[in-house]
Image: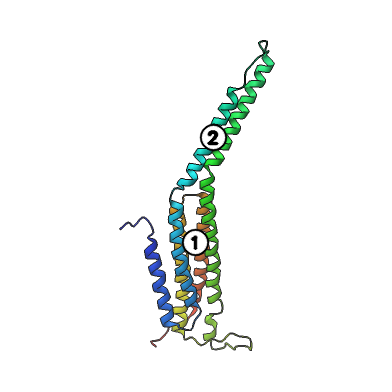
Amino acid sequence: MSYRTLDPDKIIATAANLERRIGERFPDAGLQNVAGELVRLAADTAKAAREVARPMWWLRALIALSVIGGGLVFFFVGSFLTFNRIDTDGFDLVQGIEASINTLVLIGLGVFALLRIEERTKRNAALRGLHGMRSLIHVIDMHQLTKDPVVFSADFEPTASSPKRSMSRADLKRYLDYCSELLSLTGKVAALYAQSLADHDVLEAVNDIENLATNLSRKIWQKIMLIEPATAQ
């Protein structure tokens, strides 16, 4: 067992166990469905992360054939070019050298662009997956939005539009704690992409997701700290 890398299977197992825990304590809550979506997202991300870590041999072969084909065309065309002018002056020579240098630079840029196609393809795939995680984090936050400990204040008076609140202090603590766990696990799922693909844009996106999850989790724990210690139920 390596403690330097994240194990996707253990992340999926942890998310599945969290889904069961939520369902057992809050069988009628929509949070269990959110946890189930996280389990599916973790499984999809683990598969996608393994895919981006593998070399795209078919693409590399296509790029190699393109480079070789371009080189052969360049050599074939160049073999037909002859210099019939014996009296080539210095100005024409400079122009020829400049044109050759420009051609080589353009060829080099083209080859470099081709070699980066695989990198860009993997980056785009990872960023698409990370976008879904950011949305899931906001869905989790929506589920804890109305879970406010102010309802336990002696002077609290609900209005006609106030959401129905029937949880005890102990249940509200557990519910908020489950939300915090879901946020943390989502950040770990996102980190699977960063572990598989050492790309600057992907790393930035993963850091943004983890920071978002941490900030929202901090807000949840502020609510938990405001709840009075629960007595034994």
Question: Judging from the image, what secondary structure is the residue with disc 2 in?
Answer: helix
Q: Position of residue 86 (x, y in %)?
A: 66, 10
Please tell me whether mark 1 sits on a helix, a strand or a loop.
Answer: helix
Placement of 56 over or under 216, stated as above or below: above
What's under tag 2, amino acid-wise? Gly
Near-viewer residue (223 or 217)? 217
In the picture of the structure, the residue carrying the numbered disc 2 is 69
Residue at x 46%, y 61% (from the top left corner): 45
Give the residue drawn at x 49%, y 38%: 64
How far across and down, in percent of the image, does residue 145 sit?
56, 76
Image location of residue 38, percent across then percent down = 47, 69
Q: Would you place residue 95 above or below residue 106 in this image?
A: above
Dot in front, 2 or 1: 2
Alpha-carbon distance for marks 2 and 1? Answer: 45 Å
Instruction: Name the residue tied to disc 1.
Output: 210
- In this view, the residue farthest toward the left is 1
Q: Amino acid at mark 1?
A: Glu
* Residue 152 numbered tag: none
Where is residue 75 shown, x and y percent of the image?
Answer: 56, 27
